[in-house]
Image (tube, rainbow, N blue to C red):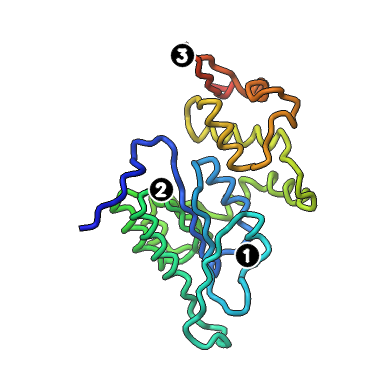
Amino acid sequence: MITLNNSLTNTQNEMVIALLIDGDNVQSGYIDAIEKELAILGNTTHKRLYYTSNTGISNGWGTVCNAHALNLRHVLPYTDSKNSNVKNVADSALIIDAMDILYSGNVNCICIVASDSDYTNIAKRLRESNIRVLGMGEKKTPAPFVNACDEFKYLEDLRTKYATEIKGKQSEESDENAIPSKEEIENFITNLLNNAGKPLDAGTIKQRICQMWKNFNEQNYGASKMIKFFNTKKFKIIQESGGNINIDLQSR
């Protein structure tokens, strides 16, 4: 009998996510929106891109992999690669990895990014083991895969949701040391608090910010310490009796 590693339990508040992308099936232009949405939901510890090719990475992923710290899982095609209709085999590698991640016991959510019904059975299998399955795909995604997930988010909707922030980021990509605008970070915090539906610990919020922007430093925004960064008309600072500081939206 196989015993699962109990290093992570469902009593943990934080969602720990494995991001698995079918690069043969999804365009690279969605990656910014995908990462922004996952940063709101929890901590993404696995970021893997799967593709089938012996001539290069398809769908533009080769130009964004390093910038987004994606780990490549390259699978050579098993048939004549000159045939344009060759069946991609990256999906089987993604499915095997999903099962390995399940048995590692280190995550409580697996996000599968694909518009392919081939992932229907693995989604159902993961849910049977009490792993939350978040699907992401285009609106052409077949209903069986959509319905097999705990939640499914359409990539077109996510791209629209974060369109302004992504456009701003793209205009700054030539500067490797560019920092996000304060407005972008405040929007991120607002989305984080709205998703939580309750106040969050200030330290937890900063941790999420740093997961999204590795070079974040509140001093770049004129705040000598993090608590001063939250001191705006958008947020209220809640000092608890035990010394903890929580942050909530002024609007609620």
Q: Which mark is residue 101?
A: none
Decide which of tag 2 and tag 1 comes sooner along the chain. Answer: 1
Q: Which residue is mark 2?
A: 107
Decide which of tag 3 and tag 2 comes sooner along the chain. Answer: 2
252 and 73: which is toward the camera: 73
Whole-percent x, y for residue 114 in the image: 49, 62
Q: Inspect the image, locate mark 1, and give the three-letter code of the amino acid beneath it.
A: Trp
Q: CA distance from mark 3 to mark 1?
A: 48 Å
Q: Secondary structure at mark 1?
A: helix
207 and 184: which is toward the camera: 207
Left/right of residue 205 with respect to residue 60 in the rendered view: left
Q: Inspect the image, locate mark 2, and give the three-letter code of the amino acid beneath it.
A: Val
Q: Which mark is residue 242?
A: 3
Q: Which residue is mark 1?
A: 61
Q: CA distance from mark 3 to mark 2?
A: 30 Å
Q: CA distance from mark 2 to mark 1?
A: 25 Å
Residue at 68% of width from left, 41% of height from top? 215
Neighbours of disc 3 within 10 Å: few (<14), some (14-19), many (20+): few
Neighbours of disc 1 within 10 Å: few (<14), some (14-19), many (20+): many
Residue at 55% of width from left, 85% of height from top? 81
Residue at 28% of width from left, 53% of height from top? 128
Left/right of residue 160 with respect to residue 168 in the rendered view: left
Q: Secondary structure at mark 2?
A: loop
Q: Secondary structure at mark 3?
A: loop
Image quarter hosting the N terminus: bottom left
Decide which of tag 3 and tag 1 comes sooner along the chain. Answer: 1
Q: Residue furthest left?
A: 1
